[in-house]
Image: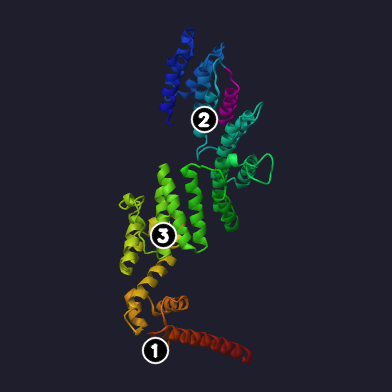
Amino acid sequence: MSDDEYVYEEDEEYMSGDCDEGDDGLEGMYYDAKDKIDDDPEAAVDGFRQVVEADEAKVKWGWKAMKRLVKVYFNLKRYDEMVAVYKDLLYYEFDGRTRNDTEKAISKLLDYTSTSASPLSAVSAMYDVTTEYVSTGVRNEKLWFTIKMKSSQALLESKEYDKCMKALEELKDWCRSPESPTTWDKKKGTQLMTVFATEIQLYQELNVLKKLKHLYEAAMSVEGAIPPPRITGIIKEAGGKMFMQQDDYEQANEAFFQAFKHYDEAGHPRRIQCLKYLVLANMMSRSSINPFDCQEANPYRTDPEIKVMTDLIDAATHNDITTFESILKQNKNSIDSDPLIKKYVTPLLVTVRTQVLQLSTKAYTSIRLSYLANDLNIEESEVESLLVAMLLDGDIVGGIDQVNGILQLGSKSDQARHVALQRWAAQIATLHKAIRSRLQ
C-alpha cells in the first residue's frame, strides 16, 4: 500500500466519527505537520512531536502522529529515534484502540522500514521490539507468528543465515503438537508450510542439497494444510531446482509446471522466471510435449521476457541446431544473467545435438563422422564423444570404426559386440600404458 493510500485510510477513520469534536486543535497541528513532510521534514518532526505531547486526552491524534514520525525518522535515517518512537507507539493507549489498529500499524510500519536499503541493525531492532510487545501478557499467537515469519524473511534477505535458522527453529517448535512434541500440530499445517517455504529458500541459498531434499519431502507430507498459492509455488520451484541438480529432468519438469501454475494463480511476478525453468526442464527431459500447449502457459508465449525460451524450444522441436546455437549466442547476456539457466546451457546444447544426431543417423547403415561434424558445425572428436554416449545409453544401435571415422549402425547384437570391443580396446590401451611406465 502506498503512503498516499495510507493517508486516505487514516482520514477516512477520522471522518467516520472516531474522534471527538473538541480535537480541532490537534487535528490542525497534525495536518500542518503532515504538509511539511516533503519540503521540510525536520519541521514536520517537530510538529508531530508537539501533537504527541499535546494529546493528553489520548484521542488518537497522538497515535497518528507517532506512525508518521516512524516513517519520517526512517526517511531521515535517524534509526535510533525511529525505533524509540515505534516502541512508544506500541504501548500508546487511547480510547477505542482495537487489536485491528495494532496489527495494521505493526504490519505497515515493519513493511515500510524493512527494505533492502535498511541497515540490518535497525530492522532487527524493530522486530525485536515488536516480538517483545506481542509476547507480553496474554500472547496474541497469530500476531506473534506473523511477526516472527516477517523477521525470518528479513534475516534471510539480509543473509543473516544463522539468525534465520534460529528463528525458523523457534517457529517450527510453535507448530508442534502440545500433546506430542515429536509430531506436528495438524491445526497449524498451513503455518508449518509457510515456515518450510522460508527454510527451503534458506538452504537453497546455502546450496545444501541433502537438507533441501529432506525439507521438500517434509513440506509435501504436511497434513491439514491449505497454504496460499505463493507458498506452494515457492516450495515447488525449490523442488524443481533440486530435481535439476539430481539430473531428474522429468520430475523437475512437473515441479516447475506446478510452481508456475501456483504463482500464476497468486498473480506473483515469479511466474515468468518459473516458466523459463519449465521450458529448460522440458528440453532437458527431451519431452515431446510443448509446455506452451497448455492453457495456463499459452498466454505467455509472446511475452518479451519469455520469447528467447520459446524460440529455443521451437528450434529444439524442429531439430534446427543452427538456429538454436544462433539464439544462444545472440542472447548470451540475458541467458547468463540467470545462474540456473546459465548452468544448463552446455548440457542443453548436448541434449539438442544428441536429438539431431539421432534423427540424422536414422536413414543410414553407416555414415562418416566428418559428415555429422559438418552437419552440427563441431569437431569430429566432439561428434565421436556424443555418439559413444548415445551408444552406451542405447539411443542408437551400432558401433564406431575409429580408424576410418565411420559410424556403423546395426542391430542390438551388433551394438553389444561393438561396445564390448570398444571397452576391450580401452582396457588394452590402459594396460599398454601401465607396462610402458614400468619399463621406463
Which dot, 2 or 3, sits closer to the camera?
3
- Real-space CA distance between mark 1 and mark 2, rounded to the nearest whole angstrom: 75 Å
Label 1 sits on what residue type?
Asn
Q: Position of residue 66 (x, y in %)?
A: 53, 22
Q: Quadrant of residue 92?
A: top right
Element assignment for label 2: helix
Asked if residue 367 is positioned above or below residue 85 in the image, the reply reads below
Earlier sequence position, callout 2 versus callout 3: 2
Question: Where's the C terminus, which quadrant?
Answer: bottom right
Viewer-proximal residue among 310 and 84? 310
Q: Position of residue 146 (x, y in %)?
A: 56, 35
Q: Residues within 10 Å of mark 3 (few under 14, many from 20)?
A: many
- Please give the name of the residue rendered at 52% of the width and 25% of the height, measured from the top-left corner: 100
Label 2 sits on what residue type?
Leu
- Real-space CA distance between mark 2 and mark 3, rounded to the nearest whole angstrom: 40 Å
List the residue tagged with mark 3. 280
List the residue tagged with mark 2. 109
- Please give the name of the residue rendered at 35% of the width and 59% of the height, measured from the top-left corner: 290
Q: Which residues are magenta?
A: 78-93
Earlier sequence position, callout 1 versus callout 2: 2
Q: Residues within 10 Å of mark 1 (few under 14, many from 20)?
A: few
Which dot, 3 or 1, sits closer to the camera?
3
Asked if residue 423 is positioned above or below residue 16 in the image, the reply reads below
- Please give the name of the residue rendered at 33% of the width and 69% of the height, measured from the top-left corner: 321
Q: Are marks 2 and 3 in contact (CB under 8 Å)?
A: no
Residue 89 lies in the magenta-colored region? yes
Element assignment for label 1: loop
Q: Position of residue 234 (x, y in %)?
A: 49, 48
Q: Is residue 268 visible?
A: no
List the residue tagged with mark 1. 404
Does the magenta stretch mainly form a helix, a strand or a loop?
A: helix
